[in-house]
Image (cartoon, grey):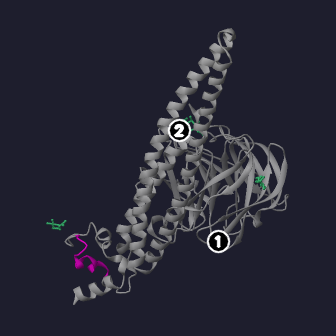
Amino acid sequence: MIRTLCFLVLLSSTTAWGRVSLWSEGRNGTGGGSGDRCTCDAFLPSSTFPIKDLVVVEQTAVEISHKLEMEMGKLEEYETKLTVYAEKIIKLTAEIEIMEKNPDDYNDADMEDMKVEIKQMEALIKELQISVSSSIAIFESLRVQITAMVETLNKLEKTYDKNLVLVTRREYIKVQIQLEECERRHQELFNPNIGSCAHTGISRVSKPIVSHLNAHLSSDHKFGGWGKDSKPIPDRETMYWFSGSTGASIGDIRFYTNYKNLILRNHFQHHVLHSSWTGTGNNFIIRDNTLYYQDSSPFGLAKLNFTTMKYESRVIPSASALFSYTNSPGQNFDFASDETGLWVTYASEESNGLMIIAKIDEPSFGVVEEWMTSVYKPGVSNAFMVCGILYAVRTIDMHTEEIFYKYDTNTKQESYVSVPFERFQDKFSNLDYNPTDQKLYMYNDGYYVNYHLWFNHTATVAPPTLLM
Ligand SMILES: *[C@@H]1O[C@H](CO)[C@@H](O)[C@H](O)[C@H]1NC(C)=O
Ligand SMILES: *[C@@H]1O[C@H](CO)[C@@H](O)[C@H](O)[C@H]1NC(C)=O
Ligand SMILES: *[C@@H]1O[C@H](CO)[C@@H](O)[C@H](O)[C@H]1NC(C)=O
């Protein structure tokens, strides 16, 4: 009877043949050959289980995994080419120097040869640049595919037993880690712009990249944040942090040695904040192994250095608890960090709820300078800083946010812009930029989401060889 039912389920899903074995891999006693019909016993309790969806997700995972292996191979090839080109350039430079010193020893033909060699070099570098940007496009499309996988998995998890989806989930985690590794290598090789402020602002935001579904495996940790240290201490460069809560507060934080352990929920430290140090709101950040967050009592700024476990607090007398972001309560102080240091934004009754930007001196934890903006905080869904420029974001509709305003503290100029981007879930409580990888990190109703940013570069992007 069971076998017959099982057979029907498989028949109704033509693509299932041959894939079922992979999907059920790891289950004991089921054999594993594609002809073994017992492999689907696991989903028999619910005969309507959409195995087709799961199979598609799993196939996607395998395809992505193959593509990533190919990309990794290409990266190695680029690396070799870069080394060869760098050597050639050094050789050419030396030859030109000799020619310049002894111009009489060379004739026009020698000069022509030299010019040809330089032209060839230019062409090779151009070609490499094109290959590199095609890799970026591939990563981007893989990100989109992974996001679609997450959506399907999430739907399945909501409707059916989580265990049924578990094996496919592992496949998904595997490709996530692979992609991250691939992108990291790529970035190391080809992104000379990290840390640079030679641009006029953000021009585009990528599709949302989902790193994690429901925090703590439950859907009620709607508030929180995640990300990386924006000025990591030695040995903690790959560290990630996460803090989640059922309310707009912070009482603990977890540290993970790297991305893989974040995904596997395998923390190496779990700090529970002392009861008199707990915080409100969710616009905290980690910088220099230090947590910056909003103090509940006294209402103000808090700083907790995890290197020393030293806690400090500061009060900004004019700051008001009346003004928070549109969809998120209790977010009166919003910490941010960028290429230039540490910032906090808030609003006051004197400012009539308009946002004020304050630059913070990290050692003394005092406000150095302030700038007044003309955006009303309750109309803003969140804000962050990049290169001393405040970017304010607002909600457009169910799935869209928009960077709509910027204030440049360097020039005291403000302007309205429109850089829309997609949101994954309904609400978010934490959005911050990280200068170490030029990404935006969002905590979206328990989902860990991040975005790549593109900038309007004022200087042309340095060719890869300059990295040498
Ligand atoms: C299944 O489990 C039993 C005992 O728990 C073990 O002896 C057997 O080797 C396992 N089979 C497979 C295929 O892992
Ligand atoms: C970036 O440059 C584009 C094209 O020149 C322009 O339309 C856009 O407004 C710029 N964005 C910002 C944020 O400066
Ligand atoms: C945290 O403490 C360490 C050790 O005293 C110190 O070097 C570091 O500067 C402190 N960080 C901040 C942000 O104050």
Q: Which residues are magenta?
A: 32-43
Position in image of residue 175 (x %, y %): 43, 58
Q: Nearer the viewer, mark 2 or mark 1?
A: 1
Q: Is residue 314 left or right of residue 120?
A: right
Position in image of residue 426 (x %, y %): 61, 72
| Disc 1 residue crowd, few under 14, some 14–19, many 20+, Cα 10 Å | few
Q: Which residue is mark 2?
A: 233
Q: Quadrant of ligand 1?
A: bottom left
Position in image of residue 361 (x %, y %): 70, 40
Pick the front one: 56 or 81: 81
| Residue lying furthest bottom | 1
Pick the front one: 397 or 5: 5
Q: Which residue is mark 1?
A: 399
Which residue: 65% across, 20% down?
A: 109
Identify the mark nearer the N-term, 2 or 1. Answer: 2
Residue type at tag 2: Ile
Q: Secondary structure at mark 2?
A: loop
User: Is 150 placed above or below 123 here?
Assistant: below
| Disc 2 residue crowd, few under 14, some 14–19, many 20+, Cα 10 Å | some
Residue 110 shown in magenta: no
Which residue: 53% across, 38% down?
A: 233
